[in-house]
Image (cartoon, rainbow, N blue to C red):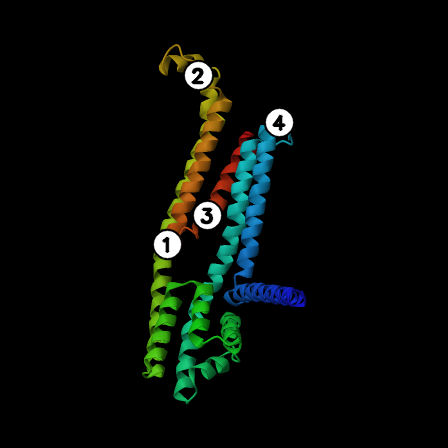
């Protein structure tokens, strides 16, 4: 009897100990996840994504209520759906615009950071000490990123992981290529200082090529905007002058020209069709403009917002669609 009771006590202690261990492991995982978010700079992105999704969901719900007739405040269900698209593209798009500009500046300063690492290596410092020493310097907008690398190294991570986390934060091909080159050089055990000099020169040349490409492609972005606004202007002119004459006094004559016995569409129907066409054109032109500008669809988001908003605004407050 006493042996059975003792055994039960031991089982309870083991279960309690296991529960404490599981709780400690969960807390460690949560801390590790939060630390990863801080190190990789994903906290702001997470906040922006949550705000974007929340705004889109709110406007979609309002669109559904408006479609069912529950909500009547002067905007149609289509307006709320467009608001959903604008809120999604606007919040995320302008966040990406600010982030890309910051990355552009980081790319410009990064070769100086690599060159200073090379000089520190030549002075006899280890790779880790070179980074810790560089974190005390002033590299403009790049300084916080270097301090994050130094912080991650001081937390116990190796230099390779810290540099890879840095490349994940900025997400540019030039920096990722340079970081991989530096990591391979440090692993090979060769003359790291010479490799760093070559990496700095390579990063600077890549940056010059990217700047030249953006300059050359800027004219194509302008052409896309001009084409979009010309299309919008033509539709507005048609809806304000030419089409009202077709469906007004000249409507009977136009019926004969367009097929005889059919009923000519009303001005409101034609204007609504043109409105939908202009919104679709705005989406397509924005995507193309972003690809021309940066080569990625991420850069297209802000162009989609601008073109769709202008199209909606002009039709809504000029024609009352």
Query: Do residues under tags 4 and 3 come within 8 Å of each other at their CB atoms?
Result: no
Residue sitting nearer the eye, 71 or 310: 71
Query: Do residues under tags 2 and 3 come within 8 Å of each other at their CB atoms?
Result: no
Q: Is residue 211 left or right of residue 134?
A: left
The answer to which image quadrant residue 35 occupies is bottom right
Q: CA distance from mark 4 to mark 1?
A: 43 Å
Q: CA distance from mark 2 to mark 3?
A: 36 Å
Q: Earlier in the sequence, mark 2 or mark 3?
A: 2
Q: Which residue is mark 1?
A: 295
The answer to which image quadrant residue 164 occupies is bottom left
Residue 206 visible from this viewpoint: yes
Circle number at residue 69: 4
Query: Do residues under tags 2 and 1 come within 8 Å of each other at their CB atoms?
Result: no
Q: Earlier in the sequence, mark 2 or mark 1?
A: 2
Q: Is residue 197 left or right of residue 252?
A: left
Up-down: is 156 above or below 228? Answer: below
Q: Which residue is mark 2?
A: 264
Circle number at residue 256: none
Circle number at residue 303: 3
Residue sitting nearer the eye, 62 or 290: 62
Query: Do residues under tags 4 and 2 come within 8 Å of each other at their CB atoms?
Result: no
* Residue appearing at x 44%, y 76% in the figure: 159
Query: Do residues under tags 4 and 1 come within 8 Å of each other at their CB atoms?
Result: no
Q: Earlier in the sequence, mark 4 or mark 2?
A: 4
Residue 144 in picture, x, y percent from top left: 53, 71
């Amino acid at each position: 009897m006493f042996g059975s009771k003792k055994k039960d006590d031991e089982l309870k202690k083991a279960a309690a100990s296991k529960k404490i261990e599981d709780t400690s492991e969960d807390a460690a995982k949560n801390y590790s996840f939060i630390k990863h978010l801080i190190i990789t700079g994903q906290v702001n992105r997470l906040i922006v994504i949550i705000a974007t999704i929340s705004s889109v969901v709110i406007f979609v719900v309002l669109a559904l209520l408006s479609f069912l007739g529950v909500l009547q405040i002067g905007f149609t269900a289509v307006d709320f759906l467009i608001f959903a698209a604008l809120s999604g593209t606007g919040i995320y798009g302008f966040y990406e615009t600010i982030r890309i500009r910051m990355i552009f500046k980081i790319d410009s300063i990064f070769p100086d950071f690599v060159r200073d690492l090379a000089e520190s290596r030549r002075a006899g410092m280890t790779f880790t000490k070179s980074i810790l020493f560089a974190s005390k310097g002033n590299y403009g907008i790049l300084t916080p990123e270097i301090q994050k690398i130094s912080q991650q190294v001081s937390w116990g991570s190796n230099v390779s992981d810290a540099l890879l986390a840095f490349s994940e934060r900025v997400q540019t091909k030039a920096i990722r290529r340079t970081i991989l080159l530096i990591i391979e050089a440090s692993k090979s055990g060769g003359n790291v200082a010479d490799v760093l000099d070559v990496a700095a020169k390579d990063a600077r040349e890549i940056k010059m090529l990217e700047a030249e490409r953006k300059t050359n492609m800027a004219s194509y972005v302008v052409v896309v905007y001009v084409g979009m606004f010309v299309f919008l202007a033509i539709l507005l002119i048609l809806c304000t002058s030419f089409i009202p004459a077709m469906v007004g006094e000249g409507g009977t004559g136009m019926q004969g020209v367009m097929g005889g016995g059919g009923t000519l569409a009303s001005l409101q129907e034609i204007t609504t069709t043109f409105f939908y066409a202009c919104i679709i054109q705005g989406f397509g032109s924005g995507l193309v403009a972003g690809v021309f500008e940066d080569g990625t669809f991420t850069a297209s988001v802000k162009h989609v917002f601008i073109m769709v908003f202008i199209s909606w605004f002009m039709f809504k407050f000029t024609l009352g669609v």
